[in-house]
Image: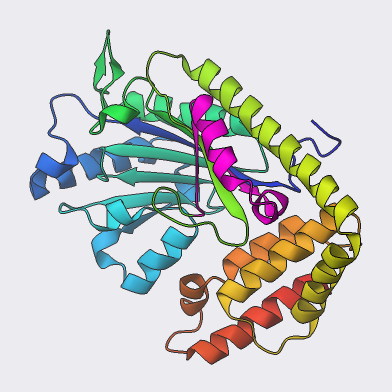
Amino acid sequence: MNKNINETDIAVTTRIRLARNIKKTPYPRKMTPIQATELIEKVRSAFDNSPIKDTLKTYEISKLSELEKKALIEKHLISSELCASKVPSVAIISNDEKISVMVNEEDHLRIQVFADGLDAQSAYDTAKKIEKLLSENLDFDYDDKFGYLTSCPTNAGTGLRASVMLHLPAVSAAQQVNPLLKWAANLGMTVRGLYGEGSRASGALYQLSNQITMGVCEEDIINRFTAAACSLISEERRISAQLFENNPYEIKDKCLRSLGLLKNAYMIPSSEAMNLVSNVCMGANAGIIKNIDCQSLRKAMFSAMPATLSTHMEKAPPQERDIKRAQILQEVLQ
């Protein structure tokens, strides 16, 4: 790795997700509302006896507004599948939003842990602690031959999905995304858009994740995933250097124009803001733009996504949200 140990200039955030189900309990799609509610109470009780109970908040999905659901989806804290669950479902989320446990999504439990930059190991260690805590009260569905059993066979075995959100403006500009997809597939990885399967990239943000969960141990998954992420980060750096060498004036102009718009625009729609932030961060990584904290800028961008912003500006028209978004980003740039 380079001097930025977690590669935070390119790696935005890492997520570890463990899928677990409970023995002798119908999976969510076959559960009755009573069974679903009983499971929720068991999970809540497990956390009530834990040292982290005071840092957690339970969100009952059926009681959330559509706007609140969308805001949590924007932050990757819940999934659209959880919102579509036919039985009672909840999300148990830590105050710092680094931990999210979805109950009664596709599987009984989806344990998610987030870490800044490329840091699969620490996120995995935390996820395993939560899994152990829950296992003291819940009997996980495990088979000696197939490992942890899941609703979808592609998650069985370890039930472990590691993913990292990567900012790849050079790969995008050089139109190297399709070769990237083939490269990832050959390594047992997949590359998707900002919100995972079926979504498109926005602001040159992509998700790299492992495809194989069975027939390999969790430690190997983490090591292979981290190695693949590091290779992709190196490729982004290589292509970026090549782009700047071949088109220095055009790239510099693009980055500085974007910075000017971010600093001075009165209102900025979210899609435009994503692209402007992407260009500014590319310029910062190349040394064209100085004194920019890209990590803080990206966090501000995500806090100003449409649904997330709307939860703080109830019934505000789109134009007012666009004005507020511009103000939020300008505060970071100052």
x then y, percent, for residue 260 = 82, 79
Residue furthest front as drawn: 246
Q: From the image, which quarter does the N terminus lie in?
A: top right
Near-viewer residue (178 or 136): 178
Q: Quadrant of residue 137?
A: top left
For residue 172: magenta? yes
Instruction: Identify which residue is drawn at 38% across, 35% down.
Output: 49
Q: Residue 323 placed where, x, y %?
A: 63, 87
Residue at the spot 23% in from the left edge and 33% down from the top edge: 151
Does the magenta run of residues contain 1? no
* Residue 325: percent from left, percent from top: 63, 79
* Picture quadrant of residue 235: top right
Residue stretch rendered in magenta on the structure = 165-194
- Does 252 sit left or right of 223 as displayed? right
Position of residue 163 in the picture relative to residue 252 (left or right): left
Identify whether 302 is placed above or below 88: below
Residue located at (14% from left, 31% from top): 25
Q: In front here: 14 or 243?
A: 243
Q: Is residue 15 visible?
A: no
Against 211, is 165 above or below?
below
Regarding residue 320, the answer to whether it shows in the image is yes
Q: Is residue 17 above or below residue 264?
A: above
Q: Quadrant of the C terminus?
A: bottom right
